[in-house]
Amino acid sequence: MARRAGHPGIALTVIAACQLMVVLDATIVNIALPHIQDALKFSTTDLTWVVSAYTLTFGGLLLLGARAGDILGRRRVFIAGILLFTFASLLGGLAQEPWQLLAARALQGVGGAIASPTSLALITTTFPEGPERNRAFGVFAAVSAGGGAIGLLAGGMLTDWLDWRWVLFVNVPIGVLIAALAPLYINESERHPGRFDLTGALTSTAGMATLVYGFIRAAEEGWRDSLTLGSFGAAVVLLFAFVFTELRAKEPITPLKMFTDRNRWGTYVIMLSLAAAMFGMFFYIVLFVQNVLGYSAIKAGLAFLPVTVAIAVAAGLSQALLPKFGPKPFMVVGSALVVVGLVWQTFIRPDSTYVSGVLGPMLVFGFGMGLNFVTATVTAVSGVAQHEAGAASGLLNAMQQVGGSLGLSILTTVFGTASTDETKKQLPKFLANASPEQQAQFTKTHQLPAPWGHEVLAHGISTAFVPAAAMAGLAFVTAWLVIKVRKSDLESLAGTAGPGIL
């Protein structure tokens, strides 16, 4: 039996540590990407799978993980998710081949999808309603918001001071400790009878995975490649099967009725679009600051901290003013700022400095994203019955993860095509000016060294930001045309509406 009454602080620490570990795992690995690429011989396009393998399984199975907690018991499922995440982290740190790391990252995503939604739900099980629960939710939110920044710094320090493998190994002792303490200090929840929509979960995840694979394959082999075309065909079939399954399921993993409210489905489109741009921006700027500007991993982590500050400041501003103005102004202005930041980054060049090519556009981008984060979360659950609030917010989180994977794959396709074209342009210059040693190295690796390689990388990155800006543009148009300011939403945000609004 849990002893929560005597040790609520330990219980909250265990829950918050789980959320921190899952949240920071994306950014802590991002900083190590150039080192992973060198160690395991990833191509730049294949390297995107280190991110997508995690986000696809995490986003695709998130709602199934929440359902598992309700049916089987949240503490039990929480511990299972933590142990799976920990085991996958160990496998990833030991990986000797690219496929081994990708398999471990996918398994990490499964563990995260099981543990993350139950960790939030466990707060309601462990803490009584009132000030104590509100404080616990505040700590949980702070950890979720700050996890990205912590991951950037931790990833840089671990990669520079130890080895890239420690960005994965670090999860092992933490995960084991969480799994050991959870049965002692966290209460088990009451089980609720229900069904697992495994068909919906598998068809949606497999459909998005084959779609992402199709885009990444197209970047390497072209649009006429038979496997590329086959992947897109399989994705269409699987996603149609997913929709058909959800329409007929008695307890669907994705309640399609969530899309009947225009503000809610508009919010989902905005989050999908902005996440698609955001994941790509972080991925390619990490490569730029380390491979072109020559930053160490820890310096790269510090270089990204201003964007997290900008997100935090904007999020605080929107949270304070949201009850007065409603969600639409923040979504419109925020999305517009994201577009401006990404358009600015299309001008990145090999001779761009950190201030002109990275910091300026990242601050604009980060402030725009911050205006959207809190707003989107509140709008997603506005007007939803209390028992459906978890599904509404979980679907928003899933949109963010899946959108990030899809967007990164599209940007990778554009990056691959642009890099190939620029390589052809730089090759004669390289052959005319390179030393015999450089030419021999190129024959071995098929990668141009600096300064020709910097030209290729910078051109590919700047071109990839064009579709990223277009994705953010879709978010702006959706915010402008779809989102409506409704009196009921303003009343609920101000706390004057009756029960059931939020």
Image (cartoon, rainbow, N blue to C red):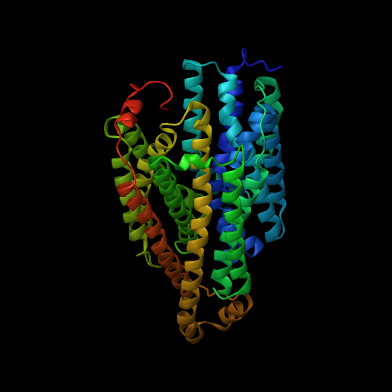
Closer-to-camera residue (238/142)? 238
Closer-to-camera residue (135/154)? 135
Image quadrant occupied by the C terminus: top left
In the rendered structure, the answer to whether residue 75 lies left or right of residue 501 reads right
How many numbered circles does the render carry?
A: 0
Give the image quarter of residue 498.
top left
Query: Residue 33 at what x, y percent from top left?
Result: 56, 56
In the rendered structure, the answer to whether residue 13 lies left or right of residue 339 reads right
Q: Residue at x 30, y 48 (%)?
A: 480
**Residue extending farthest front:** 248
Closer-to-camera residue (77/25)? 77
In the rendered structure, the answer to whether residue 470 lies left or right of residue 421 reads left
Q: Residue at x 59, y 66 (%)?
A: 43
Query: Residue 2 at what x, y percent from top left?
Result: 68, 18
Query: Residue 299 at what x, y percent from top left?
Result: 47, 51
Q: Is residue 271 above or below residue 74?
A: below
Does residue 210 appear anywhere in the picture?
Answer: no
Query: Residue 261 at what x, y percent from top left?
Result: 41, 40
Q: Is residue 338 above or below residue 218?
A: above
Q: Is residue 423 above or below residue 116?
A: below
